[in-house]
Image: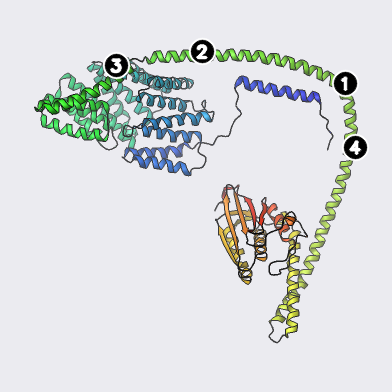
Amino acid sequence: MSLIKKDPARLCKRTFLFFLISAFCGLSSCHFPTRVNPDHPDYFRRIIDSAQGMYDLAHPHGGMHLVDSVYAIFPNPGVGDLYMKYSFKCDYYCKEQIRDYYKGLLYADSMIQVIHKAGLESRFNKEFADANFSKGDIYFKLGKYVEASKCYYNGKIFAEKTLNYCDRASIISRYAMVNYQQGKFLEAAAFFKESFDQASPCKTVNFEFVSKMQEQLGNTGLSYYKAGLADSAMKYYNRALDYIEKYKFLFSGNQAVYMETAKGVTYGNMGMVYYERGDLAMAETFLKKSIDIDTKDGNEKMDAEAMQTKLIQLYLETSRLPSAETCLHQLRMALDTLPNDIVEMHWRKLAWNYYTAVKQPEKANYYLQNYLVIKDSLDARARTLASINPLLEFQNLDQKYELSLLKKENELRDLYLLITIVFSFMALVIIFLVWRNWNRSKKNIRTLTSLNRQIGDQNLYLQTTLSSLEQSLEENAKLMKVVVHDLRNPIGAISSITSLMLAREDCPPEQRKMLKMIGESSNNSLTLINEMLEASTAPDEMKMEWVEMKGLLHYCVELLQFKAAEKKQQIVLQAEPLNIYSSRGKMWRVISNLIANSIKFSPEGATVTVRMERIDDTARISVHDQGIGIPDNLKDKIFELFTDAKRTGTSGERPFGMGLSISRKIVEAHGGRIWFESDHKLGTTFYVEFSLSDERAVA
């Protein structure tokens, strides 16, 4: 123990350090680390794949239910785990069969926020970029092209931080898709080719990579086809087929189905090239091959719809009107199930042409009017999209980003200047205070040295006295153990002899009354002796083991049922199966004592409820009675050893006042706690709580 006086110079140093740390954090925007739950990528990837498989097998709601149920029961998923969940739901609602883009937008926001709120953008660079790309794709589908460009730009910034060609390829493919939608097909083809070339050096060959690469080749061919370059389109379609054939053996299950679907899409695109060339036989062959593949469950049904429009057009040109009529009806049913605005427009035009060919002018005119309505709507949307220059939008956003960086840099310079001035002033103040306190320090040191020497002498004296007191207490405890232990045998003998004499049938009534008094006194004395032995037992003498508490509670209740029956009472047990690392005998002592007290202070016919439940990482045992309660003036004394807070039971049972003190000692020796709640109308409830920090504690 030492005497310390506050030093102003030391206080100033601490203030200086505080301002230094605050300034550093202000300059560097530092964040103190927060605890982040670990991720479980392998486990949740299997769940997501299973859910995706259910969707591909035409059970979309089953996949969503699987994901929700698994995440609902999984404790503390990590940031990456939650990202996978939101990504799956975003993809689900953006599927062509669902097309609930606003819900998809909510989950795209969740993908961004779960990373942003944890402050882990730098750790999840790729995921954060992909989330912004997904959000941009949804805005694009909703016709909000400016918002889409902003999201693409945000994704571009984070993708570039990874210095990963594969991630940058995602940005370029989105440039390409915007140009394609605008009708700039040659520009789109160039961007699709660049995206493929950027990703080619990537060494990771997995399903996601292969599917993206064949998609870029197919989109390049489609862009050339739209630009009127059929030979170039056919070249890239063949490259896409070769790419699929090269890697398809690596995949199985749903992934293999996807690769087969990609082949079907390519066949359809090749069929359209043959159609433009005038080779109608080859065109029909490839279109049918595409439709056969894409109409299977889990495949690209929307592409099948597009190919059916081209096949119907072929039938009309070759005057095969019955075949055209059959395909028109089939396509109508498909569109009713899976709407598609562009295919709907083509269907109405084909219906107009068909009814014109079969000489039904009223129907032909009806479908012509419907065709013109939807065509005007789609043309208006195309004009809106064509008015946007994505590269110019990106350049504007890039300039704004650079301006914001310059603004922050200027703010930092101003802050540096301000901090320099503040530090200079503080340095002058500190120098002055140090000089002033230096003159005082010599006198203070002499005074403190003298006081510390006195305190050291006092500490030595107190330590010696405390050691003597501890030794005396230890000797008294040993002596009490010996005396109490020696008393137990003769008193036990008296109790046994009394029981034998009472068992005799020829015992006179006068003697029987006296013998009952002797037996009762002997039993009370034995109870008191046992409690004194319990009170003198040290915690380190307990034998600790894993105890199945539900069985122990059941045993205690069974043993005390006869005592409760004497007062026509009932003991009810409600318990979960939990294990606690403890001393079985000591725990039995605590529970038995609490139940016995409830019986003692409850009226006849009452119910004593014993309950055990898990609350977070603790096991809580409660014993509730319907008794007389504990008066307010005794509540602070009942846990004291040899307390005067003693009351007789409702049937005159004699109290000793040591049971609750012993129980508290045992509970605290186990690292637990004990307390009570009491009301003279509602009765008393005693609680005992233990930690379940070890996972083995749960049965």
**Residue for badge 3:** 185
Q: Which residue is mark 2?
A: 403
Assess whether mark 4 and mark 1 are in contact (beta carbons under 8 angstroms): no
Callout 4: helix, strand or loop? Answer: helix
Say which residue label 4 marks. Answer: 454
Measured in 3D between alpha carbons, the distance from the residue under mark 1 to the one under mark 4, in whole angstroms, is 25 Å
Question: Which SS class for mark 1?
Answer: helix
Nearest to the eye among marks 4 and 2: give it: 2
Residue linked to disc 1: 439
Q: Secondary structure at mark 3?
A: helix
Against 312, residue 426 (above or below) is above
Q: Seen from this angle, which residue lies furthest bottom?
A: 506
The image shows residue 59 at horizontal and vertical percentages of 33, 41
Q: Who comes first in sequence, dot 1 or dot 4? A: 1
Is disc 3 in contact with disc 2, using a CB cutoff of under 8 Å? no
Would you say the residues marked 3 and 4 are in contact, meaning their CB atoms lie under 8 Å apart? no
Mark 1 packing: few (<14 Cα in 10 Å), some, or many (20+)?
A: few
The percent coordinates of residue 244 (x first, y second) are 30, 28
Earlier-in-chain disc, 2 versus 1: 2
Residue at 67% x, 57% y is 543
Q: Are marks 1 and 3 in contact (CB under 8 Å)?
A: no
Nearest the eye: 354 or 28:
354
Amino acid type at circle 3 is Phe
